[in-house]
Image (cartoon, grey):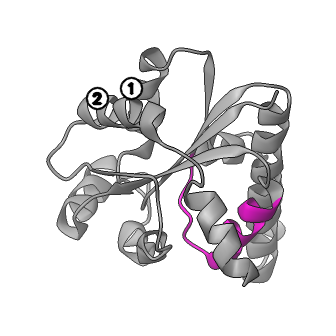
Amino acid sequence: MTGRILLLNGASSSGKTSIGRALLPLLDDPWFLVPVDAIGAMRSTVHRRDLDRAGIDAMLRRTRLGYHRAVAGLASAGNHVIMDYPLSEPWRLDDLLEVLDGYDVSLVEVRCSPEELERRERARGDRPEGLARSQRAVYEIGDCDVVVDTTATEPAACARAIAAALPGLTAPKAFDRLRIRRAC
């Protein structure tokens, strides 16, 4: 039996990680919160000094491709996984649709107003200014299973809404519908 996957898709600073943490105690079975930032944090940074822009882009792409496969590996062993991941480049979704074919994936869109994203970015201080606005493509996928908006709603309330919605989701889910549309 494969595990379920819950993909929290939203711009940087939209609240994905906070929602993921708040979801863990709400879900019945053991779940792993696997944010893409945690995978990136495992990578050495020593060699980045020697890379040009193309080299850095290639390294980041390899990291993200590996992340997709790590999530699939956990789920293939029967583990449930919460992904905290912005689908900010079309190839990310394309690869995930292929790698996660046959898995039970629920796609959650985590929305937040541009003004609030900018405020959070400034407050965090650990993201390049303008990163969240540059990730507008995360909201152009055209399908999802659940939508939450963190502009004025706390992560715990968003997590409760997601946990309440999950049992009512039926197939075909957003990933299945997206895969079918792309095959046509």
**Label 2 Cα neighbours within 10 Å, binned few <14 / some 14-19 / many ≥20:** some
Look at mark 1 in the image and give the residue it sits on.
22
- Asked if residue 31 is among those painted magenta in the image, a careful observer would answer no
Look at mark 2 in the image and give the residue it sits on.
156
Look at label 2 and name its amino acid.
Ala
Height in image: 80 above or below 71?
Answer: above
Q: Residue at x 41, y 75 (%)?
A: 136
Which residues make up the magenta segment? Answer: 84-98
Q: Name the image quarter holding residue 79.
A: top right
In the foreground, 169 or 118? 169
In the foreground, 165 or 136? 165
Q: Residue at x 83, y 69 (%)?
A: 50
Q: Residue 12 carries which label?
A: none
Precedes in sequence: disc 1 or disc 2 = 1
Look at label 1 and name its amino acid.
Ala
In the foreground, 165 or 56? 165
Height in image: 18 above or below 26?
Answer: below
Position of 172 with respect to 57 (left or right) is left
Q: Residue at x 50, y 73 (%)?
A: 141
Image location of residue 182, percent across then percent down: 69, 79
Mark 1, secondary structure of its residue: helix
Q: Name the image quarter holding residue 98.
A: bottom right
Image location of residue 81, percent across then percent down: 65, 33
Q: How far apart are marks 1 and 2 (CA)?
A: 5 Å
Mark 2, secondary structure of its residue: helix
Cβ atoms at labels 1 and 2 below 8 Å apart: yes
In the foreground, 60 or 77? 77
Q: Note whether residue 129 is visible.
A: no
Image location of residue 147, percent across then percent down: 34, 53
Height in image: 112 above or below 30?
Answer: below
